[in-house]
Amino acid sequence: MSEFRQTTLPNGLRIAAEIDSRAYSSSLGYFVHAGSRNEVDAESGLSHFLEHMMFKGTDRRSAADVNRELDELGGQGNAYTSEEQTVYYATVLPKFQDRLIDLLTDMMGPALDEGEFETERQVILEEIAKYEDQPPFGAFERSLEVYFGPRGLGRRVLGTSESIQSVTAQRMRAYFNRRYRPENIVLAATGNVDFDGLVAAAQEKTTTWSQRPNGGEPVADDPATVPVGIQLDRQLAIADASQAYLVRIGHGPSSGSDDRYAARALATLLGDDGGSRLFWELIDTGRAEVATLWPQEFTDTGAWFNYLVCAPDEMADNVKIFDDIMQGVVNNGVDQEELDQVINKAAAGCIMQSERSSSRLFSLGSRWLTHNEYVSIDDTLGKLRGLTVDAVSKAAQDYLTCDQTDILAQASGEVVSG
């Protein structure tokens, strides 16, 4: 059985661990409350840019040392940035726990070298350009920008070419000092973990974190303006695109909402790519390449996405089929047999994922960072198995009938029939 333990260090760093002595691996990660919604216009993209810079060396290690040591530990390590957090993590054999703590903690105090900063600026600009060249060509980002507004949850995680080109290393240092404070960070661990050793090492190695100079609050944005490089048109003209891409966004449950499990079940029932109502009507028949939907949860709110990809001249007809399927669930609810299949699939997936310490790490660390709450596998399975037809049908009423914003990406001059 797993054991949950947690503590808070004197400097404010929170530590949470789900310990399973039977596991063959240990996963550790720093979860930082620093995401695109925490930025102002002059900092747009800095959370993600900073994530890159954390691998570019410290006062004790060069960039080559960081990467070499990760290889020496034989583990799998990486990082990611979202709207609400930045995460640095790795999975190793339990005997390397102390070395991994030392490495990850050292990385959390980056050198932010000017030369590395300029080199990485070009890497980020190339990443933005590459992303904008790939389907659905920024339609998801545009939907968030239009729905939430171009700031806060609507701010692009990568930033824009304009914001990355104008940002300075000095501004990055100020952002780092403001957001990377111990009270904004959770150290999470899962698997075969020595919790007492973890706490002792973290306390020793993070002593100076609270002494970091306060970055100060940046100048607030003018809400009457639109950030440089941002457009709010609901149609994106894409040269030479052979398909049309429709993204719809509406209201969804937050990560703290009691009905988030019902909403997830509803999305699986309707939009799962391995067999669902949308799959059988639109994918299996060859009408569309993609037809799916899902909720995206944030700390205090959420979004509901519908996503349809097909030939431009078939978009209008496919949208009608899509809408008819949604309306059918709103009118008639779901049946027990469908729901049982969804529950069984979700429960099996949850159990299988829990066998990997890295999978549990993200659930544990994100939840503790945003809600200071532990949700065990048994808790999750209990919520899934407790779902009722009425609860999922109510989720359909709540989230499939809301006003939605449409973003359409297609070839320039293409006309969608209707």
Image (cartoon, rainbow, N blue to C red):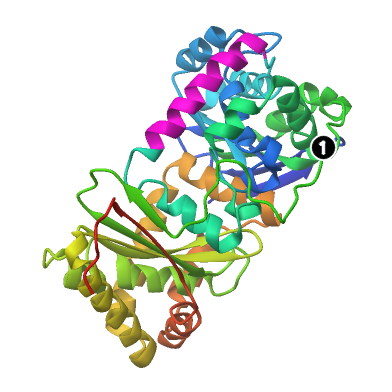
The amino acid beneath tag 1 is Leu
With respect to residue 27, does 165 lie above or below? above
Q: Is residue 333 magenta?
A: no
User: In the image, which residues are magenta?
Assistant: 113-131
Q: Which quadrant of the view contains residue 127?
A: top left
Q: Residues within 10 Å of mark 1 (few under 14, many from 20)?
A: some
216 on left or right of 378 = right
Q: Which quadrant of the view contains residue 213?
A: top right
Residue drawn at x 66%, y 27% is 167
Disc 1 designates what residue?
9
In x, y percent, where is residue 235? Answer: 39, 58
Residue 191 visible in the current orientation: no
Observer-nearest of 122 and 213: 122
Q: Quadrant of the C terminus?
A: bottom left
375 on left or right of 59 = left
Q: How many marks?
A: 1
Observer-nearest of 288 and 298: 288
In x, y percent, where is residue 78? Answer: 49, 29
Observer-nearest of 173 and 225: 225
Residue, far bottom = 331
Residue drawn at x 59%, y 29% is 164
User: What kind of element bears circle 1?
Assistant: loop
Residue drawn at x 54%, y 37% is 160
Residue drawn at x 31%, y 87% is 328
In x, y percent, where is residue 146? Answer: 54, 60
